Image (tube, grey):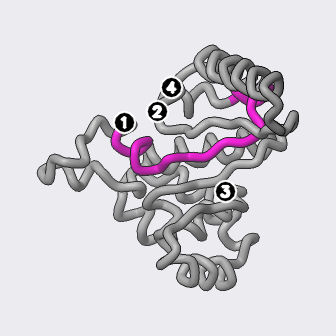
Amino acid sequence: MVDVPEEFLEAKQLLEKVCDRLRKEGCAVSRDIKTGIMVETPAAAICIDQFMSVVDFVSIGTNDLTQYIMAADRGNASLNTLQTIYQPAVVRMICHVIQTCQKHNVKVSVCGEAGSDPKYLKLMIGMGLRYVSVSKSLVNQARYSVLQTSVSEMENKVEQVLQASKVAEIRKLI
């Protein structure tokens, strides 16, 4: 898990060293390898703007991000009400990451539960999301959801959703 740009840059330097060594050994290695981060921690999400000049892309890991934002262990059933992507703090954080990436022209995608939830996917499209990763069995469902989405309608809903203070309010709005 990446928390600060220095961790990413260190990993990128290691990748470059390995690629250089492989090239010296005669292996064909592209000089244009795209590198990015998985946003899974609140630290990375809050400071996402600090990554914009060093990454080629961002993917939001919504399951881990939700767990860490809410400090709610996914394995603890008594915390299930906290462990939802519909929590206002989670919605705001995901929106912040998507809109920051969009502002800086950095490709952002989502993987995890959020991309597989048709209503939430529509909300993220309103936030500016244009790429999503879902399991093979849910691709058609995701496509259908996207095709049924009015981008302008969802863009208008985003502000209302961001003002909501309860999970039930967010669910009702979208």
Residue at 52% across / 74% down in the picture?
A: 136
Dot 3 crowding, Cα within 10 Å, few <14, some 14–19, many 20+: many
* 113 within the magenta span: no
Residue at 56% across / 67% down in the picture?
A: 121
* Residue 127 x, y percent position in the rendering: 67, 56
Per the rendered image, the range of residues in magenta is: 49-67
Mark 3, mark 4: which one is toward the viewer?
Answer: 4
Mark 3, mark 1: which one is toward the viewer?
Answer: 1
Amino acid at circle 1: Tyr
To which residue does mark 1 refer?
68
* Residue 60 x, y percent position in the rendering: 56, 46
Amino acid at circle 2: Thr
Which numbered disc covers residue 41?
2
146 horizontally vs 78: left or right: right
Residue at the front extreme, as displayed: 25
Q: Nearer the viewer, residue 31 or 90?
A: 31
* Residue 38 x, y percent position in the rendering: 57, 39
First reached walking from the N terminus: tag 3 or tag 2: 2
The answer for how far apart the CA atoms under marks 3 and 2 are is: 20 Å
To which residue does mark 4 refer?
43
* 56 within the magenta span: yes
Amino acid at circle 4: Ala
First reached walking from the N terminus: tag 4 or tag 1: 4
Q: Nearer the viewer, residue 77 or 137?
A: 137
Q: Are marks 1 and 2 in contact (CB under 8 Å)?
A: yes
The answer for how far apart the CA atoms under marks 3 and 1 are is: 21 Å
Q: Secondary structure at mark 4?
A: helix
156 horizontally vs 111: left or right: right
Amino acid at circle 3: Met
Which numbered disc covers residue 127?
3
Dot 2 crowding, Cα within 10 Å, few <14, some 14–19, many 20+: many
The answer for how far apart the CA atoms under marks 2 and 4 are is: 5 Å
